[in-house]
Image (cartoon, helix red, strand yellow):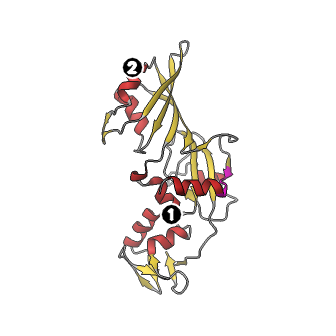
Amino acid sequence: MKERLQKILSQAGICSRRKAEEMIEAGKVTVNGQIVRELGSEADPVKDRIEVNGETVKPERKKYFLFYKPDNVITSVSDPQGRRTVMDYFRTVRERIFPVGRLDYHSEGLLIMTNDGDLDYILTHPSHEVEKTYEVTVRGRYSMKLADKMSRGVRIDTGITAPCEIEVLEYNKKKNKTKVRMVLHEGKNREIRKMMAAYHYPVFGLVRTKYGFLTMDGLSRGGYRRLTSEEVRKLYELYR
């Protein structure tokens, strides 16, 4: 049965569906020896010979991991500057997994790693609004009044942020730092840091503590666990 090329590549664990589209347009994908650049092109993963950069595409068994990304780690499969990436923690995994979405270099917390391009598409598409929870430490005393104001939206360089939930957890008078909990439904680049910077609150710590219904229970920095089949099913069902 024929399917779109980008779907075949994502299901084979080559990359995400969006990245597959970029590779097709760049002429890196061939079907039966012919370069294909049209995004609507289809192929039969069983009957056709599909190659990416000269390597034959073979279906892989789906893998799903919940990972606690530490600070000073790049959310990418590689880094031209030679910095540590999330892939350094998965050297024993044979399948070509990749991170779903991203966490900033200096941010910590939950990240899903998989070779399932369809799940990546579901969880990162803006219309699905996957809920993510963060604990953020800022310098100074951060008030509930400001939390209420910022939760309705903050103007940053990419526009006004979507409404979110902000709760003040504690203020450390000695260190002059406040810890807040933020629940976001969108994932703009460095969104939390930009929101805080708009009100002159430097961020000293940012940890993603929940991803949808998934929590950090049982995980330490740099550690990971396999997602259960029930958890994978719930991720698919919650955001359809």
> Considering only vertical position in the picture, is 124 above or below 183?
below
The residue that mark 1 highlights is 118
Callout 1: 10 Å neighbours few (<14), some, many (20+)? some
Callout 2: 10 Å neighbours few (<14), some, many (20+)? few
Chain part drawn in magenta: 225-229
Residue 153, visible in the rendered structure = yes
Report whether 17 appears left or right of 153. right
Residue 85, visible in the rendered structure = no
Question: x%, y% of residue 196?
Answer: 40, 29
Secondary structure, mark 2, is helix
The residue lying at 47 percent from left, 36 percent from top is 183
The residue lying at 47 percent from left, 87 percent from top is 32
> Considering only vertical position in the picture, is 174 above or below 207?
above
Secondary structure, mark 1, is helix
The residue that mark 2 highlights is 145
Measure the C-alpha gap from mark 1 to mark 2. 41 Å
**Nearest the eye: 59 or 92:** 59
Question: x%, y% of residue 54?
Answer: 51, 78
As shown in the figure, which amino acid type bears the numbered disc 2? Lys
As shown in the figure, which amino acid type bears the numbered disc 1? Asp
Q: Which mark is residue 202?
A: none
The residue lying at 47 percent from left, 33 percent from top is 182
The reply to whether the magenta stretch includes residue 106 is no
